[in-house]
Amino acid sequence: MKILLSGTASDSHTWNLVYLQLFLGELGHEVVGLGPCVDAEELADACRRHAPDAVVLSSVNGHGYRDGLAAVRRLRAEPALAAVPVVIGGKLGVAGRPQETETARLLRAGCDAVLGDDLDALRGFLAARVHGGVPA
């Protein structure tokens, strides 16, 4: 499975992306890493260029909700990208705990999963897509 891995627009952290690239690679996925500070338009361009099977967005700075919302809305606005599975995780808000309202908005906007820091949930999410919707 080809995964497009990206930081969010305002997040300059890279250690999370390096860790996730190694994690996803060890699971057998082909990973295209875009790096930090990727805005919604850059993400859409990369999706058109690489045709990923899924997009994984990661945030550490606490603005993942805002940036993720813009990113998923941009992808869903383009018919060719509207069906690409998008998952977001990491620190999505500055409150330090999951916010149900923000999670619900991300899901309504088109995120297929909002996972926080749960790598097992990410593994399961991706495995379900590899096995046709049936968790491994």
Image (cartoon, rainbow, N blue to C red):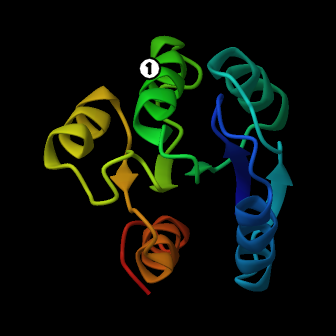
Nearest the viewer among 47 and 7 is: 7
Where residue 83 appears, as percent x and y from the top left, is: 47, 34
In this view, 109 is above or below 15: above
Q: Which residue is mark 1?
A: 73
- Picture layout, residue 70 above or below residue 122: above
Query: Which residue is located at x 52 percent, y 17 percent?
Result: 74
Which residue is at a point 43% across and 28% down the rendered structure image?
66
Left or right placement of residue 109 versus residue 3 in this view: left
What residue appears at the point 47 percent right and 51 percent down from the top-left corner? 87
Rendered-image quadrant of the N terminus: bottom right
Mark 1: amino acid: Arg
Percent position of residue 10, x then y: 64, 30
Residue farthest toward the left in the current orientation of the protein: 101
The residue tagged with tag 1: helix, strand or loop?
A: helix
The quarter of the picture where the C terminus appears is bottom left
Total number of numbered labels?
1
**Between residues 95 and 38, which one lies in front from this camera angle?**
95
- The answer to which quarter of the image holds residue 40 is top right
